[in-house]
Amino acid sequence: MSCKELIAKASATHCLTRNELIFLLKDNSCSDLLFAAADDIRHRYVGDEIHLRGLIEFSNICRNNCCYCGLRRDNHNLTRYRLSQDEIFALAQHAAVNMGLKTIVLQSGEDMYFDQDKMCEIITSIKSLNVALTLSIGEKNLSEYQAYKAAGADRFLLRIETTDKDLYHRLDPGMSWQARKQCLDDLRTSGLEVGSGIMVGLPDQTIESLADDILFFKQIDADMIGIGPFIPHPDTPLKNAAGGTLELSLKVMALTRLLLPDINIPATTAMETLASDGQTKALQAGANVIMPNVTLTQYRRHYELYPGKSNTNYTPDESLKVLRDKITSINRFVAADKGFHHRTKNGKA
Ligand code: 5AD
Ligand code: SF4
């Protein structure tokens, strides 16, 4: 089949084989067609609304040592911070009440200070604001995920990072791919909405493994998938790596939209870091979510997963205004609801 025929097949059936995915990922002559098809499927399944999720980066302390990440524990060039429960609540309140955001995302490194009791207290307080609440705080066990759900959390983000197990074990020393997969299974059991995702352009990551990643998203029946280019950080072992490209990241994202037509897909900050129109391009190639950062600038600059991530002097309120203008300029709308994943019959394999 030609790439045009393969894209038409994916749009109609939401299925592609591994070889078909590899073919499309390798052929760059079809990128624009692929983006247009993903934009069309996004419009048909999840509409023209864009869901805004207010991101609070509440601690940059992490027990892990991922080779790609600026927060890794061996990076001693980073000023570490941890917000108090009151500060976290105040940011959430500002995001919900003054900025009108309907979802709050609490993200941190794997900071053991925030144990189950503390997290549940924070969850309960934020849920009083009538918002949906997403956690992105790393690997926990089933009973912890169940406790967060019982306290009122709605969703959890845990990227698998790559489905190439050897690559994962090389890049995430001391961690286990199987344990991470178990976390995703436990999250599903807990009843939380499950978000996952990968980085594109990791050193030695193959096109074949990216095809496997996309099939993995379908296999775990994800509610949300975030895809971003890997951007080398100067204070990590991967400082001299090439990094990912916007085009390949957009292609992986667009194919994910074709195969999982009704899920939520963010236009990621890493895409915007590579190009000033990266998020706009993503919103026109399958994405329907944006996560504006509501962390105060004084802390935000230390949440440096990769360089250039927060090279903005805008306050969260100013950034939101810029974002709203961007959304309007591409004839899209900011959603008024909480933006849960609505499963459609066709979206199922
Ligand atoms: N470049 C791009 N994304 C990164 N992440 C961590 N480090 C980098 C980097 N250097 C992503 C990982 C992680 C998420 C919070 O940030 O995918 O899951
Ligand atoms: Fe920690 Fe997450 Fe960074 Fe790994 S990617 S070092 S777990 S913050």
Image: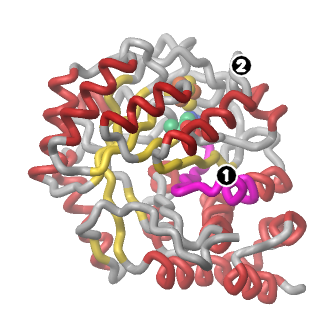
Left or right: 267 as drawn, with respect to 94: right
Position of the C terminus, as image quadrant, is bottom right
Lower position in the chain sequence, tag 1 or tag 2: 2
Q: Residues in magenta?
A: 214-230
Quarter residue 255 falls in: bottom right
Which residue is labeled 2 in the image? 173
Tell me if residue 221 is in the magenta stretch: yes
Rendering coords of residue 87 (x, y %): 17, 26
Left or right: 181 as drawn, with respect to 186: right
Quarter residue 122 falls in: top left
Indicate the amino acid at tag 2. Answer: Pro
**Does the closest atom of ligand 2 sit within 8 Å of the Cβ of label 2?**
no
Q: Is residue 311 visible?
A: no
Rendering coords of residue 312 (x, y %): 30, 45
Which residue is labeled 1 in the image? 220
Crowd class of label 2 (few under 14; some 14 to 19; many from 20; radius 10 Å) = few
Question: Of circles 1 and 2, which is in front?
Answer: 1
Position of the N terminus, as image quadrant, is bottom right
Tell me if residue 254 is in the magenta stretch: no
